[in-house]
Each structure stands twice: as structure tokens, then as C-alpha cells.
Amino acid sequence: EQYVYRFGGGVSEGKAGDKNRLGGKGANLAEMASIGLPVPPGFTISTAMCARYYEEGERFPDSLRAEVAAGIAHIEGVTGRRFGDAADPLLVSVRSGARVSMPGMMDTVLNLGLNDATVEGLAAASGDARFAWDSYRRFIQMYADVVLELDHGAFEEALEIAKEDRGYTLDTELSADDLRGLVAEYKQLVEQLWGRAFPQDVHDQLWGAVGAVFGSWQSDRAKVYRRLNHIPGDWGTAVNVQAMVFGNMGDTSATGVAFTRDPSTGERAYYGEFLINAQGEDVVAGIRTPQYLTRAARERAGAKPLSMEEALPAVYAELARVFDTLETHYRDMQDIEFTVQQGVLWMLQTRSGKRTAKAALKIAVDMAEEGLITREEAIARVDPSALDQLLHPTLDPAAARDVLTKGLPASPGAASGAAVFDADTAERWAADGRAVILLRTETSPEDIHGMHAAKGILTARGGMTSHAAVVARGMGRPCVSGAGALSIDARAKVARVGGRELREGDVLTIDGATGEVMAGEVATIQPELAGDFGTLMEWADTVRRLKVRANAETPADCRTARDFGAEGVGLCRTEHMFFESDRITAVRQMILASDERGRRAALDKLLPAQRADFTAIFQVMAGLPVTVRLLDPPLHEFLPHEEKEFAEVAQAAGVAVDVLRRRAAELHEFNPMLGHRGCRLGVTYPEIYETQAHAIFEAALDVAEKSGEAPIPEVMIPLVATKRELDLMKAVVDRAAEAVFAERGRRVEYLVGTMIELPRAALKAGEIAESGEFFSFGTNDLTQTTLGVSRDDAARFLGAYVEQGIYARDPFVSLDVEGVGELVALAAERGRATRPGIKLGICGEHGGDPASIAFCEQVGLDYVSASPYRVPIARLAAAQAAL
Ligand code: ADP
Ligand code: MG
Ligand code: MG
């Protein structure tokens, strides 16, 4: 088996499609080389070797040595330099690269191949001693950190002291001699911390670095990142060994990162940052403030240091040509890393750029309109879940703002929350349900769990491509980075700006679209749904087959849902209405009544309120189907649970306190989820369902008479396990309908159906469909009852289950397609066999989850129903499922 694949110098043993084998970085380096772009030569050790490395107890098979030697020979052949040559040495970088990019998670070592002898050779051959010693000190520093895993703080401190002693502020001020001294210090530090001398043999250096890159795949931070992003642990990383090119060879050298379009807004403009006389890591590490790529961006920001377009016009022009070549070739926005060595451009990386939801939409729509991609491709390009970012409120421009300071608008969206100064606190507070904003001087990969838990991220240092910015955009968290006026003391848990203080727990607001940081909470407004969003949704609607409805039980939610494009209500939970203050007393009187007559008296009081609820909902949804679920939860949920409430409630309901207490005790259940609920309530107290049915039909007729457009009520009986249950309840509903229609002398279309949420109902669906006119899969309960897992108690073990691969995803978030899905498929099939064309939908949380929606398309359901804010997500996911 071949493990080493070469690229550069006219050779390309890989291509962009080989990401599984070569990792994203390696595959794209080979692809860029094959289309004639300037790529320093190198080779990729495949991801398969990563797996083998771990299988063999973190050792390399002997056969790899010969392959790597051939790879090095390839680089030597192209560059004309030899690895370890004391006169004119070849230096390489050793770079990680998984199938999907994991920004900042994995390790890279630059300038490998330097030692006490080759550094002199590099100085002589390049005629630049400063550059040679700068490269050597960088190499030792990185190698000590990544490969030897020594405390990097010690090296940073030595560098800071070297500058301070000489009164410098910038690394670039250090002379060749200063750097030579620093190298001596670094080597001493290595001996001190590691107990051995810094490795001088360049082959030892190489194998050490390759092992470290493979090792970084199993680092804690990489594991956390994989868990958050659902990346399997067995994919492994590839290792890229590539000839170094140098951005630190003086003022005609530079290094930079760029996007072919703005990753924040999607605007069609080159976007990026670069640094003169620097090496790769410098730009992202926020050591010096990077310069803008284009003149327009610099002028817009009012910045002084020249843009690349102005400072290095010829190379910039070439870079712009490369951007265009890459966009047409990959037909997508690219995220690029490049280096300029003495006026010559070198490409070091390209990949599809991470982008905000807003940018994803704009880029997809623009590219389709530019003819670069088709409309179907545009639909497929936008991650439905990412739309969430756009569908939520932004800051009200009219609201008062107490602006503390301004940083860079690194990731859009607004967030308010309590200030916290470390990732662990962010995670803990968020777990307690608090909104938090994470404040850091700069973030590092160790902070990602806190960034994930936070509503927003604020940093004092770092640019638009800093770690904080990139990760926040990927996660969809608002982020303001590089708020330079802010001084953050994480140890004392305080941030200071302009004479004011923010302490842990103080509320602040950040606006990731403007970079503003404000004290306190700022009011928000609803999002703008026209423009690119509207266009893409229109395209999606022409493609999808599944209808999309909403789970909604208030007129306001129904309105939101309709505005978001809902084509009906898939689940209207009537019990939510029972809790309203103007009727809870009547509900309690009904529960406390000792006989049917008492219950009917209470229900009569309830009827007008229920009718009014349905009228309001039907008015908003006129002309569309509305599935109303009859009362579902156990009655004790409506009674007080605390002794101190008893007296007040008893008085309001007009019963003695001990009657209330006795009834509450009677209704107590050991396992309410499987207790006296759903149609079991209707079977024992048919008058409850009868009253609800009356309210539904009277409201439907009221709306039909008033607006001329009748809603289509679909009355849904919950928790049915047998056909007989449904028959009994359907009779109650039909009788109520006939009574109302007779009294009003007018009819409306309606259906009576059931939720399929018990395994028995799924199995007996064929029989149940004889009476049921529609099925709605209640996949929340169906998941609980099929898995035998109580949703409310699952938190204690579900994390471990997902971690150990027992379930791939939380089955309450993403449908367990193999198990619960099989019941859904079977019930759909049996239902259709009895009643061809039976209406089938899903109303659990899963109705808004893209993966579950794909499954619904596959089994041919008629519609999915999701919470109002997830309706657009469902529309797009349904379109993608149909492509
Ligand atoms: P990451 O995956 O974290 O981005 P990379 O392997 O891309 O790590 O390396 C980080 C940076 O190091 C690159 O952006 C580039 O600037 C620099 N670099 C990597 N390899 C080389 C090389 N052969 N020559 C010059 N710079 C390099
Ligand atoms: Mg990179
Ligand atoms: Mg249910």
C-alpha cells in the first residue's frame, strides 16, 4: 500500500477529490499544483498511516522510511537543495491536515531542518544572517512547543525580555546578533525543561514532527472539536511535508490569509490580511496588527499602514489572478494562505471558506446569478441549520446604547449576557441556563467549549482572521475581536475600558455586525427576511415536495410561522391554553368536580375561552390546515404542587383545602409519561374532548362565515395504542361536529386522525388507519417509548452514549433513523395499505432537524412540522432532501 503522495514541480499524485486519503490540505495542494499554480513542492503521508500509527502503538512501519526518503528526494530534486546540507540547506514545514478543516486544532512545525550547522549555511546562501537566525529561533520555539511539548510560556517570556532589554517593541527590530543570542537561550531552555539537547539530526527532527502531527489528532482539544462538530475519531489526519518559502526575508516578503469574497457579508470583494516580513503564524496569532489586502478595505477602515495592493502592487495583481482562477476552478468561495518570498508569490493552502449564514446565502445566490453554479447547487450550498443565525433578532437601531468601546465586527449577530472571563465558568453558567458573554484577551483552542457555551465572544486582541473570529463564525456566535481599548484581567475577573469596569456577572451586549460593545442589555428587532434569503427560499420552494407546517398554539406564533412560510399548523397543543390566567380556575374546577355534572358545569365556562383561542388561530391560518391535538397531559399538571399555593387555589375554585389536597394526592402518578394522559383522559372523561371539539367546530364556522375562507381543522387524538380507542374518540368528535353543524346550518371540511407515538400504534397502523384519516408521528414520545428512555432523565447518560457511539446523535434532536425510523416507515406503509393517500406528517422536535427531514422525504411523508423559527430551516432542508 502506498502511503506517500508527491506534489509540486510538475508532479501531482493527488487531486481535490482525494480528501479522505490526503486530508483537505494535501488534496488541495496537489490540485493547485496540477492547475499550474505556484505551490512549493512536497509530499503527503496519507490518513491511512495515522490509523496504522495508532494500531501499531504509536510507531511507524519500516516501509514508511523508504517512502518518506523518496518524498524528500522529490523536494530536493525540485528545489535543488538538500535536506541537512550545511552549505545550502533545504528546510521544510510539517503540516497537519484532516479531511475537514479543524482550525487551530492540529499542529504544524515550520523551518524544520535547521541546526547549528545549517543555520550558518542558510545565512551564507541567502546573504541574510538576520533571516537565518530568526528562522532558527522560530523553529526551536515551535518544535519545543509542538513536538517536545515544553511550556511555551518560557520561550515567549525569553523573547519578550530580549526585546525589553533593548527597548524594542516589535520582533522585527531584533538584529541577527540578538537572535543568535536568543537561540542560545532557547537551546538552554530546552536542555533545562526537556533534560536533553535540542535535536541536531534533521531526520530525527522530521520523524519527531511527523509523530507529533499524528499525535495531535488525539489531543484533548481536537477531541472536543470533533465531538462538537460530529467528526468521527477514526478519520485520522494526514501529514504534509513541504519545502519552506520565506515571508520573513525582508520588506519584499510577506505572508497572508485571504478569502475570495467577504466571509462575513458575502460581498464580492477580495478580503484578507497580510504582514510584511513575517511568517504564517504571525498573522493569525495577533502578534502584530495585520495590514489590509485591498486599498478599498484600508480606506474604509481609515487605517494608515499600506494595503498589499499599494505596498506590493505586482504580487497583489498576481494574487488577484490566482483568486479568480481558484474561484472558477472550485466554483466556490476560497479561503487561502499565501506567502511572498522576495517578490515571488507562493500558494500554501486553499479550501472552501467558512462563512456566516448571511454570507453563505449571498454567495450562493450571487454565484447562481453569475452562472458559476446552478440554482440546485445554490440550494445545496447553504447549511439549513446555519439559517438560525439570520432568523433571530438583531439590535434595535433606535434603542439607546451605552457604548463602552468598539472592536472589529468579527462575526455578526447581537448578544447580551453576563460577563465571564474563562471558558469553564462560561460552560458552567450556561449549563445553569444563564446567557453569558465570554471575555478573553485572545482565545485559543483550549477555549472552544466556553465559546460554544457563550452567547457571544469578545476579545481585546486579534484581527478578523484571529482564532476567536474564525471559530465564532463557524459556530454562528456573534463575536467582537480586537477591542484594543479593553484591558482584560482574567485572574481578577475584571475588564477595564475608559475608566469603567466590567466585573464577572455584569451584563453587556456585543454587536458582531458593527463591533460595538455596550453596557447592559440592548433591545432587539426582528430579522429582515427579504433579499437573498427570500430568493433562496423561493428557489427551495420550487424544488421541495414535503410541505412544511409549524407547531404553534398562539396567534402570534401562527403569524410568525406564516411569515416564515408555514403551510399550516402541524401541532396545536391545547393544554398550553389551559394555563392562561383567565381560565385556569375553570380547568381546576373541572378536575376537582366529583361527578360528570360538575365537570360539565366547569367545561361550559371553559368553552367560550377555547372557542376564542381557536377563532384567533383559525383567522391567522385561514385556508390552511390546522392540526389541533386534544388534551394530552395528565390532569395533575394543572393542580398546584406547593403547599403554600393550596389555600389560594382552593378558594378560587370554591372547594375546601383538604378536598384539593386529597384530589392532588389521588392524581399523583409514579410515571406520568406513561400515566393517565392522552386519549386515556378522553376515554374516562369524554366530556372534555366533546367540549374541545365543540369549541373547534364553532370557531371554524365563525371564521368561515366572517372571512369566507374556512380553515381545515384536523382533530388529533393523542397517545392512541389501539383502534378501539380511536373509534371511541372519533365518535365523540363526529357527534360534536354534527351537533354544531346542525345548529349552525353549515358545515366545514374536517379530518379526525391520531398521533402515532406508541410502538403498538405503529405496529397496528394498518388497523388504526381504518378509522384514522391522518397520522402525525409524535416522534418525541415515540422516541421515549421505543428507546425506553425518559427524555427528562436522559441528560445523565445520553452524553456518554453519544460519546461512545451507542447513538450517533442525541436521538431527541436527530431521529434515530434505524430504530424509531423503522417504526415510522412501517406505520406509513401499513397505514397507506389500508387507506391509500392517508395524510402523513411528523410533529416532534425532529420536524425541524435537517437529517430527520431527509428521512421524512425518504419515507414519503406529506409534511413536517417545526417550531415557527425553524420553518425556513425545514423548507430548505426539505428542498435539499428532494434534490
Ligand atoms: P493550519 O492548518 O493551522 O492553518 P498550516 O499547516 O496551514 O496550519 O500552517 C500554518 C501556516 O504556516 C500557513 O498558513 C503558512 O503561512 C505557514 N506555512 C506552512 N507551511 C509553509 C511553508 N512550506 N512555507 C512557508 N510557510 C508555511
Ligand atoms: Mg492553514
Ligand atoms: Mg406525545
Image (spheres, rainbow, N blue to C red):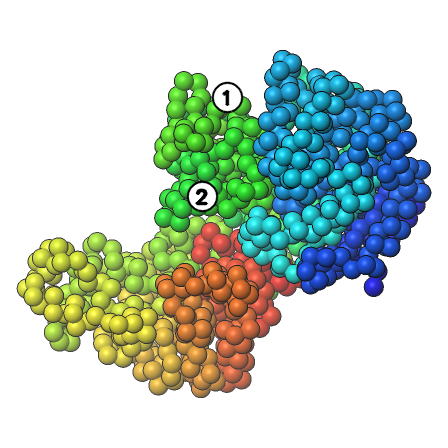
- Please tell me whether residue 30 is drawn above or below residue 750 in the rendered image: above
Q: Give left or right: position of 606 versus 494.
A: left
**Residue 737 appears at what percent x and percent y?**
31, 74
Q: What residue is pinned by disc 2?
A: 424
Quadrant into which the C terminus falls: bottom right
Q: Nearer the viewer, residue 793 or 701?
A: 793
* Near-viewer residue (370 or 703): 370
- Residue 122 at x, y percent in the picture: 85, 29
Query: Quarter for ligand 3?
Result: bottom left
- The answer to which of marks 2 and 1 sits earlier in the sequence is 2
Q: Position of residue 56 (x, y in %)?
A: 71, 62
Label 1: few (<14), some or many (≥20) within 10 Å?
Answer: some
Residue at 58% across, 57% down: 230
Answer yes or no: is residue 341 visible.
Answer: no
> How many numbered marks are there?
2
Image vertical order of residue 635 relative to residue 332, above or below: below
- Residue at (34, 79) in percent of width and height: 730
Mark 1: amino acid: Ala
- How packed mark 2 is, by other alpha carbons closer than 10 Å (few <14, some 14-19, many 20 or more), is some
Residue 192 sits above or below residue 381 on the image = above
Q: Name the residue at 64% across, 40% down.
A: 194
Three-letter residue code for mark 2: Asp
Q: Secondary structure at mark 1?
A: loop
Q: Quadrant of residue 429?
A: top left
- Residue 19 x/y as whole percent: 75, 55
Q: Which residue does the numbered mark 1 point to in the structure image?
A: 485
Q: Nearer the viewer, residue 121 or 22?
A: 121
Q: Residue furthest top?
A: 167
What kind of element bears circle 2? Answer: helix
